[in-house]
Image: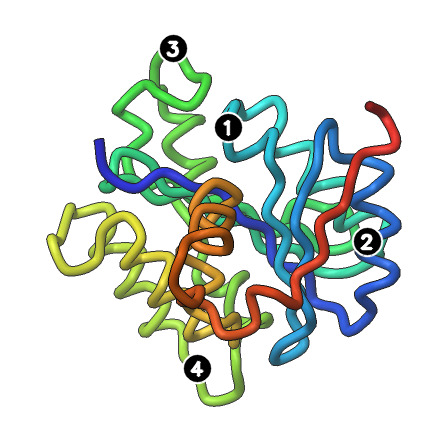
Amino acid sequence: MGEKFVNCHIHSESVSDVVRVVREITKDRAYVSPPKNHWITVYDRTSDYEYEYDDIYPFAQKLSSHLSTVVCTFLVFSGLNFIYFIHDSGQLVDEFYDDPEAAEFGFDYADDAIRERFHGHPERLLRYCLPGTNVDSISQILTSSRNRDIEIIGQEAAYQLALLLGIDEERAISGYAYFEDDLYNEREPLMEDAKDFILVQSLLS
């Protein structure tokens, strides 16, 4: 089956603001992390379990719009495929899907418009990366992912891109189900601050 997860990373230091917005927009419940390197991570249960474009995309867009900030959303499925969305104050900046020809994730087929839409634009992503990052380093990740390079597929692509953005790489390769399983297992969670995440219940339920 391979890895399958969704996560959103909000450029913010205000956990209380993120919790407030997540409580308003999640359909079920979600975990909200403490800030790290100016990013707060959200694992939304509906996004992770239902894994539907019509749930994930609006959730990310609303986070960005309501908080007037940048939200990077990473998706991995089948252990092979990698998708990202970047929103800034609610506006879509860029999106990437390494294999739109696979006709998954809500699209019946891939035409030229779909291929262009999900091609990914390193120069747009660059403005959100750590100082010293260059376009070539971003382009290499996206190209390798599209080319099915075994070293840069699925969660490895998410991991490598997170490093360039300053997002904690362990948070970038997890989702609601993985995080909860890890949090409540018999050993110490792999994520050192896992117990500091806040479980937020929807106001809609």
Q: Which of marks 3 and 2 is nearer the N terminus?
A: 2
Viewer-side residue, 82 vs 204: 204
Badge nearest the viewer, 4 or 2:
2
**Residue at 85% across, 47% down:** 21
Residue 174 x %, y %: 44, 53
Residue 109 x %, y %: 34, 14
**Residue at 29% across, 62% down:** 141
Viewer-side residue, 143 vs 145: 145
* Residue 3 to residue 70: above or below: above
Residue type for callout 2: Val
Determine which residue is flagged by label 2.
19
Q: Residue furthest top?
A: 108
Determine which residue is flagged by label 1.
49
Q: Which of marks 3 and 4 is nearer the N terminus?
A: 3
Q: Earlier in the sequence, mark 1 or mark 3?
A: 1
Residue type for callout 1: Tyr
Q: How far apart are marks 1 and 2 (CA)?
A: 20 Å
Q: Earlier in the sequence, mark 1 or mark 2?
A: 2
Residue type for callout 4: Thr
